[in-house]
Every structure is written in C-alpha cells, then in structure tokens.
Image (spheres, grey):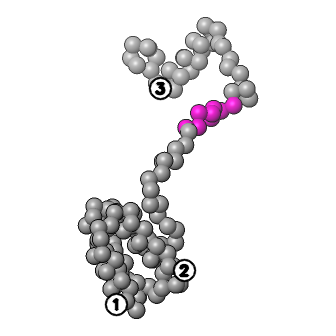
Amino acid sequence: MSSSLLDRAKAWTASSTHTQQELLNAHNNLVMRVRRGAESAAGAELALDHLGETYVDAGGDPLELLTIDAETPVPTSPSAPQTTAADTSSLVNYDQAPAIVVLDAAAKRQAFDALRSLIGTRHVNQV
C-alpha cells in the first residue's frame, strides 16, 4: 500500500505544477485520513514525505505541515495573535486600609529620636 500511495503522490505532483496551498492541502488531507484510520500510518509515511518535500521545495513553510502523531491540527492560515489586557486593578482596597495618622512636630521629633537611638548615634551629623 505504501508504494501505491507514494506512486499516486508522485504521479499527482508530476502531472502539473501545483500551488503551495494545493500541496499543503494534499499533505494535510492525507494526514487527516491516517488519523481517522482510513489509511495506515506505515503505508502513508513515504507519500507524506514526498508531498512534504515537494511543498517545501515550492517555498512552503515546513511548520505548516501536519504530523500524524499530533493531537490537534496546526492552523494552516495565520490567525490574529491572542492578546490579553493588563490587569490595572488595585492591589490594595484603599477603602479598607487603616487611616494615616498625621503626627504633629513633637511626635515626629520623638519618633525620630527613637529611631536614631536604635542606630546608636546621638547627632544627626554623625549619620
């Protein structure tokens, strides 16, 4: 059977000049027949190789060729890339955030002196 499919593929490609799309369709249709079980994978392998090489020689992209063992078909035509929008929502719900306490000058000085004592210096110039 492999020589039959190969012979048919060679005869078809030699019969006339085919477009890249026709070659791609012929290759991918044969792959789909193998996936459905209409053709044996071993029997179609040589024919698929021939059709794939002919397609690439005609300037086609080998990444567009389907493979027998792939689970999902690769799209044959370029599609719009999928994009997602950036999540610009707030990380913190400010309505539930604790209120900011504004310190007066004396409280600020006391907090600063407490922090300065932790560092171990007594004069601002030494920091």
Front position in the image: 9 or 87? 9
Label located before the other in sequence (2 or 3): 2
Measuring from the top left, give residue 38's x and y in whole percent.
52, 84
Label located before the other in sequence (1 or 2): 1
Q: Element under label 2? A: helix
| Residue drawn where x is 43% and y is 14% of the image | 124
Front position in the image: 18 or 119? 18
Indicate whether residue 123 is drawn in magenta: no
Q: Is residue 104 above or below residue 111?
A: above
Measuring from the top left, give residue 80's x and y in whole percent.
48, 47
Look at the image and give the residue range highlighted in magenta: 86-93
| Residue drawn where x is 44% and y is 56% of the image | 77
Front position in the image: 114 or 105? 105
Q: Nearer the viewer, mark 2 or mark 3?
A: 2
What quarter of the picture does the C terminus occupy?
top left
Cα distance in 3D space between marks 1 and 2: 20 Å
- Name which quarter of the figure residue 23 lies in: bottom left
Residue topped by disc 3:
119
| Residue drawn where x is 52% and y is 44% of the image | 83
Indicate whether residue 90 is drawn in magenta: yes
Left or right of 34 in this view: 8: left
Crowd around label 3: few <14 · some 14–19 · many ≥20 (10 Å): few
Q: Is residue 9 above or below residue 110?
A: below
